[in-house]
Amino acid sequence: MGKAVLFVGGTRSGKSGLAQRWAEAQAPWRLYLATGRADDAEMAARIARHKAERGQGWQCSEEPLDPVGLLSGIGLAGAGQTKGAEAPSPGVVLLDCVSLWVANLMAADMTEADILGRVDALAAVVADCPLPLALVSVEAGLGMVAMSSLGRRFQDTLGLANQALARVCDTVLFVSCGLPLALKGQLPEELC
């Protein structure tokens, strides 16, 4: 079984950068599982910047609605092995990010119960993933209560999603100002 690390923190806390650093220390071939969508020019530029920052050794798969489907088949062929002319199989997976995934599911008019059902399916895959796995999510409980019912629904649903994923991860790191704090497990030495 691979180890799973949940990186959680506020916007621009440094969680994605630390998750990338951790993943790069795990294996030379890595899969970046992106949940973001380039729905406007600003988001397209943000995605392009993130791709450029990742550099060599990364494969990218965009799964804004169904990361569980892709993760379910990960690692079955053996980490790091090359199949013919294809790229090597990844030795680690970075899912960035859970909060965008939840927002995408809400935008698809899914109920909280349906979204949390998908989160439970993701948690089951995380618990059984044969590869090291990093998950990134925004901590929804640090700011003020949202002004709109949609915002409050998002905060509530994401908070419950983060709790479900934290239960199955070996390590949970809270990130603030680019610094990780272990909430569960030990701070990985790659991040010390």
Image (cartoon, grey):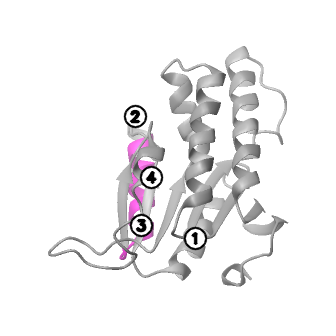
- Which residue matches tag 1? 2
Answer yes or no: do the residues labelled 3 and 2 have beta carbons within 8 Å? no
Q: What is the CA distance from the residue labelled 3 to the residue labelled 1?
A: 10 Å
Residue at x 68% of width, y 59% of height: 6
Q: What is the number of the mark on residue 72? A: 4
Answer yes or no: do the residues labelled 2 and 4 have beta carbons within 8 Å? no
Q: Which of marks 2 and 1 is nearer the N terminus?
A: 1
Left or right of residue 95: residue 44? left
Quarter of the view holding residue 164: top right
Answer yes or no: do the residues labelled 3 and 1 have beta carbons within 8 Å? yes
* Residue nearest the observer in this picture, 148 or 131: 131
Mark 3: give few (<14), some (14-19) or many (20+) Cα within 10 Å.
Answer: many
Q: Which of marks 2 and 4 is nearer the N terminus?
A: 2
- Report the amino acid beneath label 1: Gly
- Which residue matches tag 3? 75
Q: Can residue 9 be seen in this view?
A: no
Q: Earlier in the sequence, mark 3 or mark 2?
A: 2
What range of the chain is rendered magenta? 43-57
Q: What is the CA distance from the residue labelled 3 to the residue labelled 2?
A: 33 Å
Residue 38, how many percent across, how many down?
39, 39
Residue 20, how many percent across, how many down?
55, 69
Q: What is the CA distance from the residue labelled 4 to the residue labelled 3?
A: 9 Å
Left or right of residue 8: residue 53? left
Residue at x 63% of width, y 40% of height: 120
Residue 72, how many percent across, how many down?
44, 52
- Report the amino acid beneath label 3: Gly
**Quadrant where the C terminus lies?**
bottom right
